[in-house]
């Protein structure tokens, strides 16, 4: 394709007429007499949350995208059971994966496969260090590389620098709300990275009215608690959550109170988990308190309400019209990943939970937070423009955020750090022997520095609840406030759990 043809294709895909910008808020489309070119797009996934996000994002891609999904073998790769759950509900192009998930392939095997037969684009839906490694290897080893699309699953507000740092060389970075895009653009510019963020509706937040139960189906009888591996982080706090759930089950014998976990014994998750909830359930817990795994969609089918601290599952519940509660007993702040819910109408505390009082999302919160109109999504359009530029050999490589690579030994260290025991290379072993003492020394130095000059801890806002007649959230009191009393309006110190 000539450069002029590529520019014309780009203008058509972006909805321009004679180079003018498209009408704001209207989805750009190809001219009616132009058949879209079939595009081969490969998705790469590893952990449970990245597998679910990557597969479902691709399932919503245009019909002329020919899709393939590969699982990358890493220390935290999802099990076959987790993959089957993650791949439930995909479109016809990927539906077979729910029955027969792909066998994990090593990074070198995946990159070699892409090198031999480059697709038009690759969705890099991988945990940070592995995403950086794979993107770097494709840049280095694939002569006519595909367009590299990446992103983050779930709620990505507040913006995290590591998310940008690991994925700076990708051509397009998918986020899921206008608020997230603004936050990441500001963060990227501050860090010297040219913004490359696109908007897509979170696949699990697609509006999906709850259907009437069919004959023989389960009745709606469950209060589902969406557990998270790293929030809250402390064992004592997790024990408190279990106590509240036990009390809810006792007070409401007509409900099944479900602790919905994302991994079974021996299975890995995107975030490491200490003190799993199943280990904290007392032996005398009521029989209607149960621990279950499986697809969240199945649990929401029989849910009367969804409870969490900050899990993305709350957005799935909102999309289905299921009442929800985001517990604020531990406060509100970036370390709890729950700042996004301020003003949503879903905030509450343990008293609300035990009393059976749940929230309904406020319409004014939705547009800026994950529930914008589909017409405002631009990720597939922008990916098509990049693929047209690739056709014309005009795809421009983005620089890494990591300014010093350090040669082959440094690359081997980063590879070992990303893959752990999955990397069996001799150079990786050498890099580990050289790098591990250096890393230990740096960590010790940081520990000493923190002891001498403590890092300022982000404040946590006081708890809020559902108990007000005018619909405005109030500071919590009683059982849910943890005895703050007159100090309810104060900021209380917390710890960064991410």
Image: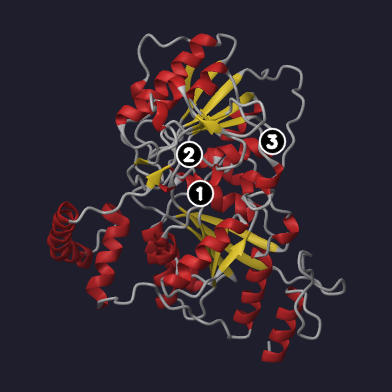
Give the crowd class for mark 1: few <14, some 14-19, many >=20 residues within 10 Å: many
Which corner quadrant of the image does residue 69 belong to?
bottom right
Question: Pointers 2 and 1 in contact (CB under 8 A)?
Answer: yes
The correct choice, above or below, for 458 with respect to 485 in the image is below
Which residue is at the front of the view, 169 or 338? Answer: 338
Upstream in sequence: badge 3 or badge 1: 1
Q: Residue at x 41, y 29 (%)?
A: 486
Which residue is at the front of the view, 401 or 327? Answer: 327
* Residue 62 in sight in this render: no
Which corner quadrant of the image does residue 406 belong to?
bottom left
Give the crowd class for mark 3: few <14, some 14-19, many >=20 residues within 10 Å: many
State the CA–CA distance, disc 2 to disc 1.
Answer: 9 Å
The outermost residue toward the front is 486
Q: Position of residue 11 (x, y in %)?
A: 74, 80
Task: Say whether residue 339 is left or right of residue 317.
Answer: left
Q: Which residue is mark 1?
A: 51
Which residue is at the front of the view, 119 or 319? Answer: 319
State the CA–CA distance, disc 2 to disc 3.
Answer: 23 Å
Which corner quadrant of the image does residue 301 belong to?
top right
Quadrant including the N terminus: bottom right
Q: Position of residue 290 (x, y in %)?
A: 48, 18
The mark closer to the camera, 2 or 3, is: 3
Q: Which residue is mark 2?
A: 82
The way the protein has been coloured in the rendering is: secondary structure
Task: Say whether residue 437 is left or right of residue 389.
Answer: left
Q: Residue at x 48, y 35 (%)?
A: 309
Question: Pointers 3 and 1 in contact (CB under 8 A)?
Answer: no
Q: Residue at x 69, y 35 (%)?
A: 320
């Amino acid at each position: 394709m000539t450069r002029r043809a590529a520019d014309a294709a780009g203008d058509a895909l972006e909805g321009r007429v004679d180079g003018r910008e498209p009408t704001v808020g209207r989805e750009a489309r190809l001219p009616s007499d132009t058949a879209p070119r079939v595009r081969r797009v490969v998705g790469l996934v590893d952990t449970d949350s990245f597998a679910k996000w990557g597969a479902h994002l691709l399932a919503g891609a245009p019909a002329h995208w020919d899709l393939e999904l590969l699982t990358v073998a890493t220390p935290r790769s999802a099990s076959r059971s987790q993959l089957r759950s993650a791949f439930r509900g995909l479109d016809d192009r990927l539906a077979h994966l729910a029955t027969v998930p792909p066998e994990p392939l090593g990074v070198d095997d995946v990159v070699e496969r892409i090198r031999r037969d480059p697709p038009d684009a690759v969705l890099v839906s991988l945990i940070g260090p592995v995403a950086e490694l794979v993107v770097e290897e494709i840049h280095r080893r694939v002569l006519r590389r595909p367009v590299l699309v990446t992103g983050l699953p779930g709620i990505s507000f507040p913006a995290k620098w590591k998310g940008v740092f690991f994925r700076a060389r990708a051509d397009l970075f998918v986020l899921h709300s206008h608020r997230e895009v603004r936050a990441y653009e500001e963060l990227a510019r501050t860090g010297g990275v040219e913004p490359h963020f696109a908007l897509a509706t979170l696949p699990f937040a697609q509006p999906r009215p709850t259907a009437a139960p069919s004959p023989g189906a389960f009745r709606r009888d469950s209060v589902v608690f969406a557990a998270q591996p790293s929030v809250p982080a402390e064992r004592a706090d997790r024990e408190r959550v279990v106590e509240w759930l036990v009390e809810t089950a006792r007070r409401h014998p007509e409900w099944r109170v479900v602790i919905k976990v994302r991994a079974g014994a021996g299975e890995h998750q995107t975030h490491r988990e200490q003190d799993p909830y199943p280990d904290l359930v007392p032996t005398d817990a009521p029989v209607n308190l149960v621990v279950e795994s499986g697809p969240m969609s199945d649990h929401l089918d029989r849910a009367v309400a969804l409870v969490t601290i900050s899990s993305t599952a709350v957005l799935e519940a909102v999309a289905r019209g299921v009442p929800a509660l985001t517990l604020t007993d531990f406060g509100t702040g970036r370390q709890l990943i729950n700042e996004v819910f301020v003003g949503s109408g879903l905030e509450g505390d343990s008293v609300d939970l035990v009393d059976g009082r749940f929230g309904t999302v406020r319409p004014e919160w939705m547009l800026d937070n994950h529930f914008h109109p589909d017409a405002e999504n631009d990720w597939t359009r922008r990916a098509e423009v990049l693929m047209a530029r690739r056709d014309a050999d005009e795809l421009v490589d983005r620089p890494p955020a990591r300014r010093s690579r350090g040669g082959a030994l440094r690359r081997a260290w980063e590879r070992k750090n990303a893959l752990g025991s999955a990397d069996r290379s001799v150079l990786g072993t050498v890099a580990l022997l050289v790098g591990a003492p250096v890393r230990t020394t740096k960590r010790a130095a940081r520990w000493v520095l923190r002891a001498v000059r403590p890092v300022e801890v982000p404040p946590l806002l006081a708890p809020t609840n559902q108990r007000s007649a005018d619909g405005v959230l109030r500071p919590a009191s009683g059982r849910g406030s943890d005895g703050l009393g007159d100090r309810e309006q104060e900021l209380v110190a917390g710890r960064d759990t991410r």
